[in-house]
Amino acid sequence: MQPNGPGPHAAHDAQLERLRSMWKDALGQARTAGPGSIAFARLADLAAACAGAWIRADRRDEARAVAGDALAVMRDACRTERDDLARHLAFGRVLELTAAVEGGAGDARGSFDCLRAAISVVGRFAPAMRERTADPLARIAIASGLLRPIAGAARMVDDPSQRRAAFAQAWDEARAWATAASGAADHATAIEAAVLAAFELAVEEHADRASDCLERCEDLRPHLDELAAVRGDDAVVRQHRAALARLSADAWARLGDLAEARTLLEEALVHLDAAAAATGADHRAIDAQRTQLADQRAALGARGVRTTPARVQPLAG
């Protein structure tokens, strides 16, 4: 008996062909687009979609070809208009995509080089992040296109001092953005970027010296207070406060002050309870923190610290 209609493989192939057709159209539009055109953002979006589809179909050579075509078009576009923000942001995103494709293919060096190139391409517009008169949406786009590859490249660096320097650069850029954005629509986004960058640096320093980690944690607290002043002590802020308390607790435990570590873990629990009760809470993320908190409390208990029973919710499923 013959099956009725096309099977799932035929439908999947048809979807890939439609995606390929859209990709060819996007390439053509980007080659002739003028300054500020949305064609560049569309090209970056479709490059990511096409490459992802080919990778899922286990056709990595075609994914690399998509990334290569996008790079060639965006490189020429940026040479033509050296001051057009839209096409440089798209070029940075395509470079990040290429880094992911190369990394997935096992070429760590190629992936790292692409991230460095993305930092260079977007970094020339970084001064706008520090300008109070700049468009808030432009500041957000530049910051995203700059901070993301800096963090990605930092994680690939083997040398601890160079890795810390990269995370410190991200933190400096985020703080400068937050200062410029004070009172503007992107202020909360900028502050949270500074919070996340400071966390990255604190965690990195924790791996080397607990005292340096605690110093960075103290630098982080004002960022959290500022974030709370902008958006209120909501679920997101409470989750950040819980993470800070847990990180500080771990550093104090490494320094031998187990009583202070216990106090901070109790503080983390209070913040997680408040986050869980808040509107719009991300319960999966909160449950993950609860599990990590339970592990920390158990570790302290094993070192002879008296702890109260942990109120830990199990992970869903």
Image (spheres, grey):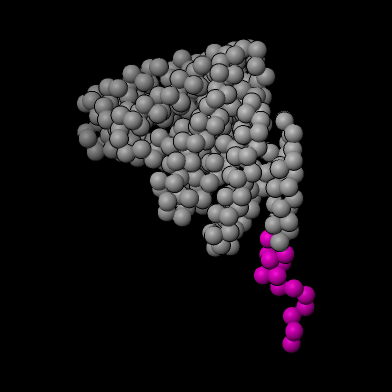
Q: Nearer the viewer, residue 87 or 233?
A: 87
Residue 159's quadrant in the figure?
top left
Q: Is residue 135 visible?
A: yes
Seen as rendered, the residue at the extreme bottom is 1
Which residue does the image show at 30% across and 29% down from the upper left? 161
Residue 123 picture location, percent across and down? 53, 27
Quarter of the rendering occupied by the N terminus: bottom right
Relative to 13, 270 lies left or right: left
Residue 84 picture location, percent across and down? 66, 28
Seen as rendered, the residue at the extreme front is 80
Q: Is residue 102 above or below residue 194?
A: below
Q: Nearer the viewer, residue 146 or 116?
A: 116
Which residue does the image show at 39% across and 40% down from the upper left? 156
The part of the chain drawn in magenta is 1-16
Residue 279 picture location, percent across and down? 62, 30
288 in magenta:
no
Relative to 215, 31 lies left or right: right
Q: Nearer the viewer, residue 33 or 170?
A: 33
Residue 184's quadrant in the figure?
top right
Relative to 158, 37 lies left or right: right
How many marks the image carries: the answer is: 0
Residue 13 picture location, percent across and down? 68, 66
Q: Is residue 239 above or below residue 95?
A: above
9 in magenta:
yes
Residue 200's quadrant in the figure?
top left
Q: Is residue 101 above or below residue 222?
A: below
Which residue does the image show at 58% across and 49% down from the upper left? 67
Q: Is residue 244 above or below residue 113?
A: above
Q: Is residue 313 visible?
A: no
Q: Nearer the viewer, residue 245 or 112?
A: 112
